[in-house]
Image (spheres, helix red, strand yellow):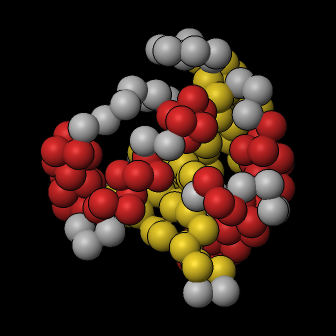
Amino acid sequence: MGDSAQLFIWRNDPVTRENSRNGKLLEFTEHTQWLETALQNSDRQIYIAEFENEQIGVVRTDRIGDVLELSWTVVPECRGKGLGKKMVVGFVMEVLGSPSKLRASIRKGNIASEKIALALGLRSVREESGADGPPMVVWETRI
């Protein structure tokens, strides 16, 4: 919870919202309630990534049956530097090891996240309607 304010700023960043499943602008109380619940959920893990002693982003996992769904965001100041791919691929290799089933839902047209999915060995399997924008594309491991 000590990182709640920083996570809130990153979550409400316009580019993050544009590429999120839920692009709604959140109020701080709504965010802190969500974070409190998320941190108590044993099927959800939230990690803040650092590179050279700087926070560069967040990776979240949600266990859904035998699948780990990944989501991530790179902090605005770190975008366009290749850190997102290093962050997510490094996270999967170092923290998760070799999970057999991974999934990520990526907003159609989010090229940076699509490149990360490809680097993880994920493939596009289907589109789902986007509540507030372009569709979401579900990417999964080749099984």
In the image, taking residue 131 as reference, residue 76 lies left or right, namely right
Where does residue 35 sit, x and y in percent of width and height? Answer: 25, 54
> Which residue is pictured at 25% across the width and 72% down the height?
2
In the image, taking residue 63 as reference, residue 104 lies left or right, namely right
Closer to the camera, 68 or 57?
A: 57
Residue 128's place in the image compared with 84, above or below, is above
Name the quadrant containing residue 76: bottom right
> Which residue is pictured at 50% across the width and 43% down the height?
13
Residue 114's place in the image compared with 99, above or below, is above
Closer to the camera, 12 or 139?
A: 12
Residue 105 visible from this viewpoint: no
Where does residue 115 sit, x and y in percent of width and height? Answer: 83, 47
Where does residue 14 sit, x and y in percent of width and height? Answer: 53, 36
> Which residue is pictured at 79% across the width and 55% down the height?
80
Name the quadrant containing residue 119: bottom right
> Which residue is pictured at 64% across the width and 15% down the height?
134
Return the residue found at the far front: 77
Residue 78's place in the image compared with 17, above or below, is below
Closer to the camera, 22 or 89?
A: 22
Number of labelled discs? 0
Quadrant in which the N terminus is drawn = bottom left
In the image, taking residue 7 as reference, residue 55 lies left or right, namely right
Residue 22 visible from this viewpoint: yes
